[in-house]
Image (tube, helix red, strand yellow):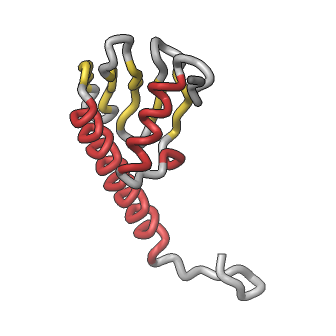
Amino acid sequence: MKSHFKKETDYGFQGLINIFNKKEINIYDWVFKRLDKERGGIEFATPNVQGTIYLGYEDLYNCDITFVNSKEVYKATLVLPELEALIQKIEDMRVREVEKIRNIIKEMFKGDDTEREDGAPF
């Protein structure tokens, strides 16, 4: 029987994509690149978390993550439910940070009622 995976590193990468889809998280909201380490995974960055997640040969996911603001490093080998919870936590942190940045930018331009010489707003 022929596998639909092209190479061994597709397993881990596709497994992560499946988690993102299951959780209804748009992976393209994260900055990521495919990682060909062991059975595959991703190297990623969000506004406040960066690191790698990949599937090891023992069918457990290895995480090496740094929380940017606190410089705290999290290294662990996780089973699937733990990984799903971690990915959801990182996504929740990303959403809060994006909302915070959005509010800061809105506040910066809130009282800016200046107009150009031709009468149009800047």
Location of the N terminus by quadrant is top right
Residue 100 image position (x, y, % from top left)? 35, 58
Q: Nearer the viewer, residue 25 or 99?
A: 25
**Is residue 85 depicted above or below 37 in this figure?**
below
Q: Is residue 101 left or right of residue 117?
A: left
Residue 55 image position (x, y, % from top left)? 39, 21
Residue at the spot x=44%, y=69% of the render?
A: 106
The residue furthest right is 118
Residue at the spot x=52%, y=76% of the render?
A: 112
Location of the C terminus by quadrant is bottom right
**Is residue 60 depicted above or below 69 in this figure?**
above
Q: Is residue 113 left or right of residue 46?
A: right
Residue 119 image position (x, y, % from top left)? 72, 88
Q: Is residue 107 left or right of residue 1?
A: left
Residue at the spot x=47%, y=51% of the render?
A: 26
Tag count: 0
Residue 86 image position (x, y, % from top left)? 26, 37
Quarter of the figure with residue 77: top left
Q: Nearer the viewer, residue 94 or 26?
A: 26
